[in-house]
Amino acid sequence: RKLGNQDKETLDGFVSNIREIELRIEKLEKLVKSIDLKQPSNELLPRGEYIRLQADLMLAALQMGITNVSTFMIGPERWDASLMYEGVFPKPVQHHSMTHNQKKEDVAKELQKIDIFHLEQFAYVISRMKEIKESDGTSLFHNSFVTYGAGLGDGATHQYFDLPMIVAGKGQGQIKQGRFIKCKSGTLNSNLWLTLANLMGLELDSFADGNDMISDLWT
């Protein structure tokens, strides 16, 4: 089947993107092989590049229609491994143990650096989604919801109240961005997932232990 010029350009861009991802994977594999250790450790790999690479694979799957929903855990909450946050610390650090000492001023400052680092990776995902065009000329970002957050509000006490959550994407214009919404005390995370599910066209009355909508999200 012959393709029009615009379709050819779209296909070429997609294939080039996949090839770029393949080359980045090969680069990381070569880096692992170059480490003079009997059992190369992931802590020596650049964490930001790993996150961005996984994100690009996720976005490629969304762009191809392989899936319409994806979950990306950038760091398990009970993971004790040290990680190389390139451009932030000169050597690998252990995020988990730091969260148990966040009342110390010096540790709190280091945790803030990691938070900024993770938000920069999230910003990368957003920028890539804005660049990816859909068949109708709109962007993947315009037609999607992207959330960012954590399951704990305090690593030392393991409390899960007052969790900050970012909801990006426009969901085809269903959400107005650029706002700070303070939900009432006791609002469940599952209420957010229930709200987004309904905005995506799923007629659900409940999800997990959530059974109430966050109506402030609607435009």
Image (spheres, grey):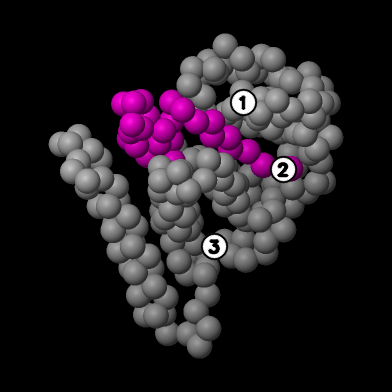
Q: Position of residue 46 (x, y in %)?
A: 44, 61
Q: Disc 1 residue type?
A: Gly
Q: Disc 2 residue type?
A: Gly
Instruction: Name the disc covering residue 44, or none.
Output: none
Residue name at image x 61 percent, y 25 percent: 201
Pointer 1 residue = 201
Count of number-bearing discs:
3
Q: Is residue 95 among what the camera can see?
A: yes
* 156 lies above or below 144: below
Residue name at image x 80 percent, y 46 percent: 158
Q: Estimate the spatial distance between the alpha carbons at disc 2 and disc 1, rounded to whole Å.
A: 26 Å
Q: Estimate the spatial distance between the alpha carbons at disc 2 and disc 3, rounded to whole Å.
A: 20 Å
State the residue in front, 182 or 199: 199
Q: Which residues are magenta?
A: 124-152
Label 1: few (<14), some (14–19) or many (≥20) C-alpha neighbours in 10 Å: few
Sequence-wise first label, 2 or 3: 3
Residue name at image x 57 percent, y 11 percent: 219
Q: Are marks 2 and 3 in contact (CB under 8 Å)?
A: no
Instruction: Name the disc covering residue 151, or none.
Output: 2
Sequence-wise first label, 1 or 3: 3
State the residue in front, 58 or 52: 58
Q: Quadrant of residue 80?
A: bottom right
Q: Is residue 7 magenta?
A: no
Pointer 3 residue = 83
* 31 lies above or below 172: below
Horizontally, residue 81 falls left or right of residue 49, namely right
In this view, the mark in front (2 or 3): 2
In this view, the mark in front (2 or 1): 1
